[in-house]
Amino acid sequence: MIEQINLISDETRERKRTGRKRPLIIGLLVLYFLGLGGVYFYEKAELNGRLNKLEQVSKQSGGLIAQNTRYKEVIERVNLAQKREDEIKKRVEVIGAILDSRIYWSDVLRSITHIIPDGIWFTSIVTYDLTDQVKVKALLSGKGVKFNGTALSNSRIAEFIFAIENSHFFGNVLLTYSQKREFHGKDLYDFEVTTELKSKAGKRN
């Protein structure tokens, strides 16, 4: 039997084995780097997508903020207009109250000239403010009128009192006094009459 003799050295044999493994290692490295590159590009694409979404959200947020600012400006203008309208309403109400409480004395005096009987002369006509207690007692305007004058007789004074009592301008008529005196041989009567203006006295619709 002939023994087989291996003439290839161990070193050469080892190199041969290594040469066979090298293409496999290179292939694995190529696959690794390809996989790594794929992961890199995937992650990069994912990151770009998120950045784009973030940019869109940022733009939308900026638009909403700008819109909200415009809404605030509109609301402030509306509130300012409402405030001005309320101020105008208050002024109109004040003016209306002043006009409602205004007394047209020309109408009152004109009515007096029509109802005053002959034989009476006024020395003064004075107005005064009524107290709150008197105002509550009747529908009065808050004004009183005091007539001072002279008459030829007490009957003329009575006629005058009757006339103003039946006038729609006056109420609560009171004769304060009637005093007789002589003037050039004739009897005259000085008097004072107080009355109160009704709430509709001298007011025009």
Image: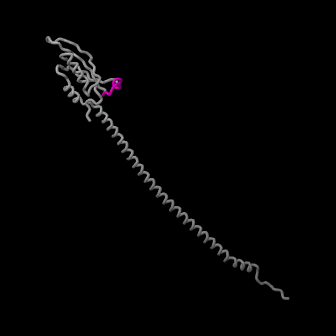
Q: Is residue 27 or residue 49 the one in the foreground?
A: 49
Q: Quadrant of residue 86?
A: top left
- Percent across and percent down for residue 192 are 24, 18
Q: Quadrant of residue 130?
A: top left
Residue 134 lies in the magenta-colored region: yes
Relative to residue 80, is residue 156 drawn left or right?
left
Q: Is residue 51 above or below residue 148?
A: below
Task: Please identify the quadrant where the C terminus is shown.
Answer: top left
Relative to residue 39, is residue 99 drawn left or right?
left
Q: Is residue 194 or residue 50 the one in the foreground?
A: 194
Chain part drawn in magenta? 132-141
Q: Residue furthest right?
A: 1
Q: Residue furthest bottom?
A: 1
- Percent across and percent down for residue 88 are 33, 40
Task: Please identify the quadrant where the N terminus is shown.
Answer: bottom right
Relative to residue 164, is residue 85 drawn left or right?
right
Q: Is residue 185 or residue 100 the one in the foreground?
A: 185
- Percent across and percent down for residue 143 are 29, 25
Residue 25 lies in the magenta-colored region: no
Q: Residue at x 60, y 72 (%)?
A: 34
Q: Residue at x 18, y 14 (%)?
A: 188
Q: Residue furthest left?
A: 184
Relative to residue 60, is residue 93 drawn left or right?
left
Q: Residue at x 30, y 36 (%)?
A: 96
- Percent across and percent down for residue 160 are 22, 21
